[in-house]
Amino acid sequence: MGFVHLHVHTEYSLLDGACRIDGIMERVKELGQTAVAITDHGVMYGAVAFFKEAEKQETLNAADRNFLGQLVLLVMRGMPTGNLSMEWLASEMCISRGQLNRRVKAVADAEGLRVYYGAEIQFFENDNDYLVYGFDEEFVVNNDLTRYNNPEEFRPVVEANNLIIYQAHPFRIGMTVTDPELLDGVEVYNGHGDHYSRNKIANKWADLHSLRKLSGSDFHGNLTLEPGGVYFDEYYTDSKQVAKALRDGKYSLKIFEE
């Protein structure tokens, strides 16, 4: 089974991320991995630097360069980023938007690439973070995930669209533990080394309330990595199948032993 880091923060997460993009590429290759995604806070300007660095690295073969560089661009096709448009991306890469779309599709077709939508969101009531899976491009275009006051307001959206929602690092300092009835699961392992997430308590909480469990690296820089993630038994064709696998428990957790 292949392992991919899907929660990584770069220097473009200002005042938070410490990982330089060129270092990400080098480290990924050292680990023998063939893919990585960046998930910076609030901005996606790092996507272009990410793409260009993937192309520049002489240690990467052509397939790996395209796989790494285009992963973020594919995810962005349906995202209402506001601060970053496909037109801006195309201009930065000195190609037209049509060329960019064709390039993205060609890479996906050639590599058999699967891109799964997911989001880390907050509600207005507090600073809690939630991980949501199971939506597609149409859902992102037609729904504003930033307008909800609390998980109770958002729960009908989850039910109506067959989504799945986890509370991220629920026992980290500054978080408020959410009513289990409003959740499908909780993150029982968060690998961010600069935060004390009380993972063991989260795991016991999940057992107590029969909640699904999730694990994530929450990667912000080379010095903070204590790997976490999920292994699936097979490759899925879209994010809805991923959500179903999570819902049905057809996965195992990657957890760094504390």
Image (cartoon, grey):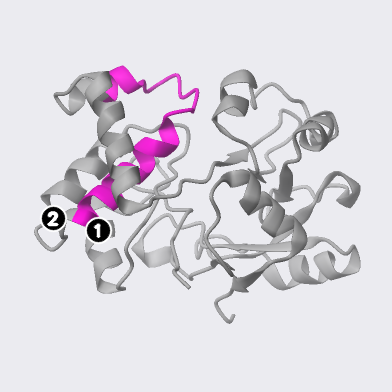
Quick check: 167 above or below 44? below
Determine the CA span between mark 2 and mark 1. 8 Å
At horizontal 71% and vertical 32% (from top left) the residue drawn is: 123
Residue under the image location 21 percent in, 19 percent down: 96
Query: Does residue 221 appear in this view?
Result: yes
Residue 28 quadrant: bottom left
Q: Nearer the viewer, residue 83 or 107?
A: 107
Report crowding for label 2: few under 14, some 14 to 19, many 20 or more residues within 10 A (C-alpha): few
Q: Is residue 53 above or below residue 43?
A: below
Q: Callout 2, which amino acid? A: Gln
Residue shown at 22% from the left, 63% from the top: 26
Tell me where residue 219 sits by quadrant.
bottom left
| SS at badge 2 | loop
- Dot 2 corresponds to which residue? 57
Magenta span covers which residues?
63-89
Label 1 packing within 10 angstroms: few (<14), some (14-19), many (20+): many
- Horizontal and vertical percent position of residue 49: 23, 40
Q: Residue furthest left?
A: 58
Q: Which residue sits at x=35%, y=58%?
A: 35
- Measuring from the top left, give residue 13's x and y in whole percent: 40, 41
Where in the figure is residue 200, as x and y percent of width and height?
72, 73
Quadrant (top left, top right, bottom left, bottom right) of the C terminus: bottom right
Name the secondary structure under disc 1: helix
Numbered label attached to residue 25: 1
Do the residues under discs 2 and 1 have CB atoms within 8 angstroms? yes
Amino acid type of disc 1? Met
